Structure formats: C-alpha cells, structure tokens
Image: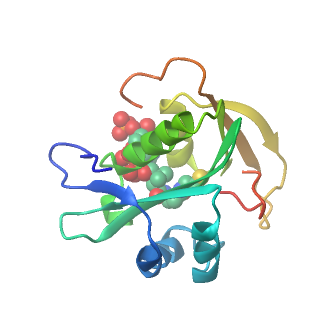
Amino acid sequence: MNMQVEQQLAVSLRPMRWWDIPSVVELEVQLFPFDSWSTEQFWEELAQPTRWYVVAQDELGRVVGYAGLFLLAPDADVQTIGVAPQMQGLGVGRVLLQALVGHSRQAGCRRLLLEVRAGNIAAIALYRAAGFTQLSRRSRYYPDGEDAIVLCLSLTAAPVNAHLHTDSKGDQR
Ligand SMILES: CC(C)(COP(=O)(O)OP(=O)(O)OC[C@H]1O[C@@H](n2cnc3c(N)ncnc32)[C@H](O)[C@@H]1OP(=O)(O)O)[C@@H](O)C(=O)NCCC(=O)NCCS
C-alpha cells in the first residue's frame, strides 16, 4: 500500500510493524494522555490475526499517524486512529479512515463500528464526513465519566464518494 495522502503532502500509508511501536507509543501518549495504550498492548494487537494496523509516514519515514481494526465478519471495529498534533487538519486522518473502510470491505465485513468520546468533536466530524451514523450512546462509558457515542458505517451500501470495538479488551476510543 502506498497511498498518497494529498498532493502537497508527502505522506504514505503502510502496514504497521513491530519496529513502529516505539514511534506509535510516543504519539499515543500525546494523543490519548489519559488512556494511552502501552507498548505491550500494541505488541498484543499486532500479534492477533483479527487485527489490521496501518501507519502514515512522512517523506523521511517518520510515523505521523496510525490506525487499526478488529475484524470479525460481518463486523469490523475501529480500534484506534491518531494523527501527530503537528500534522492534524491536513487530511491524514481521513486517508487513514479510508484505508480502514477499504480493508473492512475487502475482508467481507458488512458494518464498521466504533466508539468515540461524546466530546471528541474532531473525531466525530471525521467519522460523520465519512458517512458514519449514530447507533447508540453509552452513558458514562469511560473511566472519567464521559459518555461514548457508538457510530456505524454500513459497508453494503455504495461507498460515500471520495471523502471518504467492542473488542476483546473492551477499550475502544
Ligand atoms: C481525529 C483525528 C484522527 C483527525 O485527524 P486529522 O488528520 O486531523 O483529520 P483530517 O485533516 O483528515 O480531517 C478530516 C475531516 O475531519 C473533520 N475534522 C478534523 N479535525 C477537525 C476539527 N478540529 N474540528 C472539526 N472537524 C474536524 C473535518 O470534517 C475534516 O474534513 P475537512 O477538512 O474537509 O473539514 C485527529 O484529530 C486526532 O488524532 N485526534 C486525537 C486522537 C483521537 O481523538 N482519535 C480518535 C479516537 S476515536
């Protein structure tokens, strides 16, 4: 996979490998300061055959974003998605999400689901722009008491134009 993010951005996507974990964890603690996944958790994720992770890298090979899926057809779940603070707002998140949607379709899944903090305006806007709709709300789902919004994208319908977990650990974002 070598998807060009935007013409002016020399960012490409490739599968996440174990040697990416230190860079990913470095971003993780910035992006999710209150519930970061540890190095061990990413190792566990990559070891699972039901998981699929990608990283976005810049022209120097630095990891500037990452995203992952839990695939158990007919459903797939977005495990995580994050973009380096200095790279946010440039389209990287959208391309990472497109990759997750495309892979879920290829894997034969019929729905893509995710949980997001009710106050995460940027992420909710990203998902809605990609065609996700709200399935439910989980009251006080997160340890700090914030609600979770459960969003769903049907993969059986035609893809939303170009704009386009209840996993085993139960700790989706
Ligand atoms: C959510 C996140 C991944 C978005 O990545 P990004 O690369 O900044 O997003 P993009 O530049 O691709 O934006 C795509 C769309 O998302 C929405 N969006 C992104 N940032 C936004 C913001 N700050 N406010 C409102 N909408 C926003 C917009 O609809 C945007 O489309 P537009 O630019 O055409 O308006 C990024 O903000 C992030 O890493 N946040 C911290 C980690 C996190 O919360 N992850 C989600 C867990 S569920």
Q: Residue 124 location, x and y as percent?
A: 57, 42
Q: Is residue 39 left or right of residue 75?
A: left
Q: Residue 168 location, x and y as percent?
A: 78, 60
Location of residue 66 with respect to 165 vertically, above or below:
below
Any part of residue 37 in sight: no
Q: Residue furthest toward the left? A: 8
Foreground residue among 91 and 47:
47
Foreground residue among 37 and 105:
105
Residue plotted at (34% across, 65% down): 64
Location of residue 54 with respect to 35 vertically, above or below:
above
Occupied quadrant, residue 131: top right
Foreground residue among 135 and 57:
57
Location of residue 74 with respect to 9 vertically, above or below:
above
Q: Quadrant of the C terminus?
A: bottom right
Q: Residue 129 location, x and y as percent?
A: 48, 31
Number of marks in the rendered image: 0
Q: Residue furthest toward the right? A: 139
Q: Residue 133 location, x and y as percent?
A: 64, 29
Residue plotted at (51% across, 67% down): 31
Q: Is residue 139 left or right of residue 89?
A: right
Residue plotted at (77% across, 51% down): 166
Residue plotted at (35% across, 50% down): 92
Q: Is residue 72 left or right of residue 24?
A: right
Any part of residue 128 in sight: yes
Q: Is residue 32 left or right of residue 50?
A: left
Foreground residue among 21 and 51:
51
How was the colour assigned to the protein in this rendering? rainbow
Occupied quadrant, residue 144: bottom right
Location of residue 17 with respect to 10 vertically, above or below:
below
